[in-house]
Amino acid sequence: RTGEDKDSLNWGSNILLANEDRVQDYGNEIAQGIDTKINTIGIDVSYQLKPGFFIDLFYQHRSKTSALPEYGRDDNYLGTGIRWNLGRRWQQF
């Protein structure tokens, strides 16, 4: 759960906005602004082709519901990758 900014009102959800433009100095609370809920679910699958060498696949779904319907959205992310885990070689001096 979070609170989002609306138009030119800076309630603190965007860390890139100037601190001097905030709505108020005192009486602030966590999740103030536009009431927003964000849910994320994901799955990661990894297959080892040979020792230390992997193929990875991931999927993630992110759902955002807001008190203002135009701020809500659903996103899906799909990704793949290869990974090679190298062991450390410890040398004694």
Image (cartoon, rainbow, N blue to C red):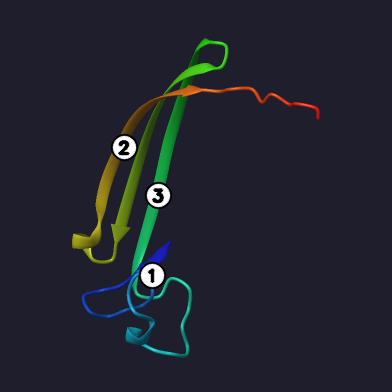
Q: Are the residues tagged 2 and 3 within 8 Å (C-beta)?
A: no
- The residue lying furthest to the left in this view is 70
Q: Amino acid at mark 1?
A: Ile
> Which mark is nearer the camera, 3 or 1?
1
Q: Earlier in the sequence, mark 2 or mark 1?
A: 1
Instruction: For marks 2 and 3, give the CA distance.
Output: 14 Å
SS category of the residue bearing label 2: strand
Q: Is residue 88 left or right of residue 5?
A: right
Of residues 29 and 48, which is closer to you in this image? 48
Q: Is residue 84 above or below residue 78?
A: above
Tell me if mark 3 has few (under 14), some (14-19) or many (20+) residues whose alpha carbon lies within 10 angstroms of its own.
few
Disc sitting over residue 77 in the figure: 2
* Sooner in the amino-acid sequence: mark 2 or mark 3: 3
> What residue is shown at x 48% (from left), y 21% (from top)?
46
Q: What amino acid is labelled 2 in the image?
A: Tyr
Residue at 32% across / 85% down in the picture?
21
Q: Residue at x 32, y 54 (%)?
A: 64
